[in-house]
Amino acid sequence: MWYSGLTHEAHRKEVEQVYLRCSAGAVEWMYPTGALSVNLRPNIVSPSRPLTLCIKPLGDSSGANIYLEKTGALKLLFRDGDHGPGQVRCFGFEQGGLFVEATPQQDISRRTTGFQYELSSRHAGSDLHALSAPCRPCSDTEVLLAVCTSDFVVRGAIQDVTHTPERQESAIHLRVSRIYRQKSRVFRAVPGGGWRGRISTLLACGVRPGRGEFLFTGHMHFGEARLGCAPRLEDFQRMYRDAEARGLNPCEMAVE
């Protein structure tokens, strides 16, 4: 969906109402002036299913700030020009809508503000580690929650790590021996048994190939598999059995 600020008079700071019916998509605002109040009205809303909204600025987005808005109160999500690696924000759908406000510009003819959005039924808390502190090791509680809520959960080893400095990202190439869950075909079968696949994380995390098996979890964000928690397999087995003995496991899975 796209809008143009040229339909507004330059001296007027109008707020245009925008309604989005799809659960995922993109908004582009050409020649931004004034502001957009973005209201999501998807068909999947259900009182029994808490929803999470994730926002990612387009790669060349400029000319406006993006806020979370509720009852007139604004919280800055992205400042004008914020579109670097890892620039994703997730929050509960009930926390409010989006308010996109154009910043003062001498020449708006070269400006286009835009973002992608995804609405899903997972909890915002399950994304907080991956998006706000991706390099911090997960706690036992975070690992156990990730096993239950992630888009993919696999057992495997790191085969290789490649880096893309211009995007400040690393691609982790995995050799997988068991798939517990995958919602998209991130991991594909290979001749001789097992699966191969690739997941992404920030370059700053300094991921390197290492020995041993891990339990890899994560979410799909805008078509890309992003790393969440990844404990060593023996550490996960210990924390799972400890929680199971105390009846604290949020879900069950087969643990060898």
Image (tube, rainbow, N blue to C red):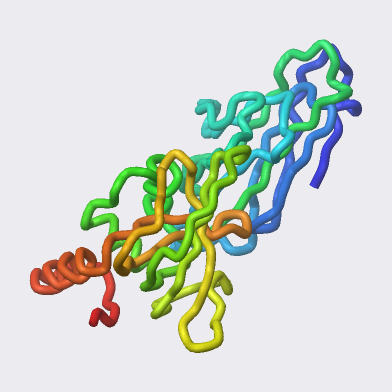
**x, y percent for residue 52:** 49, 52
Does residue 143 appear to the left or right of 93 in the view shown? left
**Residue 152 x/y as whole percent:** 45, 68
Q: Quadrant of residue 62?
A: top right
Residue at image x 68%, y 41%?
115
Q: Nearer the viewer, residue 43 or 5?
A: 5
Q: Hey, which residue is sitting farthest bottom in the picture? A: 192
Residue 150, horizontal then vertical, whole percent: 42, 64
The picture quadrant where one finds residue 189 is bottom right
Residue plotted at (52% across, 31% down): 71
| Residue drawn at x 84%, y 27% as measured from the top left | 31
- Residue extending furthest left? 246
One can see residue 193 in this view: yes
**Residue 119 left/right relative to 24:** left
Q: Is residue 246 left or right of residue 63?
A: left
Query: In this view of the protein, which residue sits in the foreground, 85 or 38?
Result: 85
Residue 35, compared with residue 244, is above or below; it is: above
In the depicted structure, whether residue 207 falls above or below residue 47? above
Is residue 87 shown above or below 208?
above
**Whole-percent x, y for residue 7 in the image:** 90, 28
What is the tally of numbered marks visible in this picture?
0
Residue 97 is at least partly visible in this image: no
- Residue positioned 90% across, 26% down in the render: 6
Residue closer to the observer: 180 or 25: 180
Quarter residue 135 falls in: top left
Q: Quarter of the image containing the C terminus?
A: bottom left
